[in-house]
Structure formats: structure tokens, C-alpha cells
Image (cartoon, grey):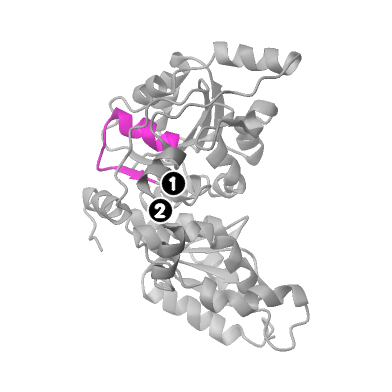
Amino acid sequence: MQTAEAGAGWQEDIFRILKAQGAKHIVYVPDAGHSTAIAMAEADSEIHSVVLTTEEEGVGYLAGAWLGGERGAMQLQSSGVGNCLNTLSLQVCGRFPLLMVVTMRGDWAEFNPWQNPMGAGDGKSARPDGRDDMAGRRARGRRSLTQRRGDHGVQRRFRLRTDSGTALDRRKAMVRSALDRREAVSRLLTGRQDLLVVTGLGSASYDVMAVGDHDNNYYLWGAMGSAAMVGLGLARARPNHSVLVITGDGEMLMGLGALATIALQEPANLTIAVLDNGHFGETGMQRSHTSQGIDLDRVAATCGFGWTREIRDIEGVDELRTRIVTREGVKFATIKIKADNPLRVLPPRDSVAIKNRFSASLGLATI
């Protein structure tokens, strides 16, 4: 294994090449092999240097930066490539460029045997081009349209789990003070003008689509947990636009570390609005952590967000809408909504077309 001291020359070369090719964003999880290049990025005022809590955050961030018209790269260790696999659906389905500079562990004479599995597998796992055995995977995964509709039917409804005692009383009180999700989102997007909107997968996308499709909407159909980081990358690339991420409590919980990353970056033009019904609506209305005592707005406040709120009335939504356009610090709001499952209004599923439409609306070239 090559040490950072012995390999400093190639690190400097990589950083200089990235910058010469127009990279504006260097994102990373700290790694000794990349330490020189990381220090160079942090010292360069023309580079957005972003330390991540986990590698998959970088995939979402760089997709958002590309949406905003800027290039970047992620520096990581081979063991971290495995953390990115779910989020690589952004690159496969949206055809976002993604450059990973990977220092290898798990090679011959590796000191730590726990590095070997990803070291041996990275050549395949880091290839998100969708070509490896695509026909075989389609054949194995093929099911009838009827069965798929049974799994994800538009009209499907679920019963909430019942409980007894104070926990049930608390949830009943929450339901009484919760908002209608469609009304809340419609109110939030009233008079949106040039607002850039990123939606988390599932119900949040349906709610935004129900208000009306828009060229400045980017809908995620997968990469669960990535919405906030896509928003961060977009906000850093487009500082003169207000950026709003609308997502659900389950999606935000899967990317909870992103709140720490975003707070350190302090993008004044970014707002995150979490539609919190305390349940995983897409998978059978199982209770989420937020129905059992976890307050996401408090987590965001602890991380260092400048403004956080828990919103339970339409006046609170109106206040949030006003704050979105002020660009006076990163903002986070939990909007408490009813635990229901309204009719799904599906946004377009052609992720390349959505990406290109979004880019074109900003006057950017499309690929």
C-alpha cells in the first residue's frame, strides 16, 4: 500500500488536472491517500471543498452541481465505493457525469483484511454504466404489469398500526394538528417564479407534481436519502437562485448525515422542507422514527442550521414560503402532515429528459 508521503506527486497532479478541466467542486470523505489533494482543494478559493459524512452524499452533491452547470469530482477510498451503490442510480438513470478518484485498499499485502472485499470488487462495483448483464437482470426481474400494479397501485390504502396508552394519545393529538399534504405543498409553491425545486422519491414528488409540472423541478425516483445533497450541490452551483428541497421524513432519515454536511457549508439559498407524517407511506404505512420521538428540525438545529421550525398550521407554511426567497441562511422546516395516502400524481420517469429540461431552463447545454 502506497503511503501519502510517497505518493504526494500524483496527488498534486490530479488536483491540478481537475482544476484545469474546470472542476469547481471537490467532495471527499477524509482519506490519507488523498490528504495532499484535499489540502490543496481546501486552500483554493476557487474550489468548493466539501467534507462528507459518508461517500453516497458525494454522488447526490455532484449530480446537483451538474444540474446547476458546474463540474466536480469525489475523492474516496475503495472501501467507500460500496457505500455509493444505491445512489449510483442517479448516474445510471439520469446519465449524470461522475468522476471518482479512488485510492485502492485490499491489494496484495494489505494490512487490514477487512479492506479486501471492496478492494477486490471495486472494478465491477464502480462501473455504473448499466451494461453488465443488463439482459440477464431484466429477465430475472421481469414481472407482469398486473403484479407491479398490485405492489404500487395508485389506489392502494393501508391501515395504521394501533397502539394503546400515551403513545396513541400523542399520535391522535398529532393527527388533529396536522396539515393536508397537498394543500401545504400547493401553498408553499404559490408564486414560485424562478425557484429551483428538488423532490425526494415517492409521495413528495407526487405532491409537487400535483401542483403542476415545471421545468425547474427535478424529481428523484430513487437514490433514497440523496435529495438534500442534490439540493446542496445545486445551491452551491447556482448561488443566485433559491433552492428548495421537498422530501419526506423517511427519505430524510436515510440521509441524516447530510444535515451535518449542509450545515458546515451554510448555503444561504437552500431550504429543506420535510413533509413529516411519521410513516413510510410507500411501503405499507409502517411507523417511522419521527412518530416515535425523533424531531428532525431539532436535529437540524443541533447541526447548526440558522433557522429551523416545526410547522403545524398554514400560517407557518406561509412564513416558510416567504423565507425561502430571502437567502439569509440555510433553513430547515418539518411540516407535520396527516398520515394518509392520496391519489398519486406521477411525475415524468424519463430521468434524462427531466435533467435536460431542467438544465435548459437555466440556459445550460444538455447531454
Can you say which quadrant of the picture contains the C terminus?
Answer: bottom left
Q: What span is colored magenta in the figure?
A: 202-219
Disc on res. 231: 1
Image coordinates for residue 271, horizontal then vertical, percent: 46, 36
Question: In 3D space, how far apart are the residues under numbered discs 2 and 1 (Cα atoms)?
Answer: 6 Å
Can you say which quadrant of the picture contains the N terminus?
Answer: bottom right
**In the rendered view, does 93 fall on the left or right side of 329?**
left
Q: In the structure shown, which secondary structural element does the residue marked by tag 1 occupy? A: helix
In depth, the one of 6 and 83 nearer the eye is: 83
- The answer to whether 25 is drawn above or below residue 242 in the figure is below
In depth, the one of 305 and 343 nearer the eye is: 343
User: What amino acid is found at the position of numbered circle 1 in the picture?
Assistant: Gly
- The answer to whether 236 is drawn above or below residue 112 in the figure is above
Image coordinates for residue 87, horizontal then vertical, percent: 50, 57
Q: Does the stretch in magenta take in 212?
A: yes
- The answer to whether 41 is drawn above or below residue 262 in the figure is below
Q: In the structure shown, which secondary structural element does the residue marked by tag 2 occupy? A: helix
In depth, the one of 134 and 51 nearer the eye is: 134
**In the rendered view, does 134 fall on the left or right side of 125?**
left
- The answer to whether 107 is drawn above or below residue 319 in the figure is below
Image coordinates for residue 139, horizontal then vertical, percent: 41, 64
User: What amino acid is found at the position of numbered circle 2 in the picture?
Assistant: Gly
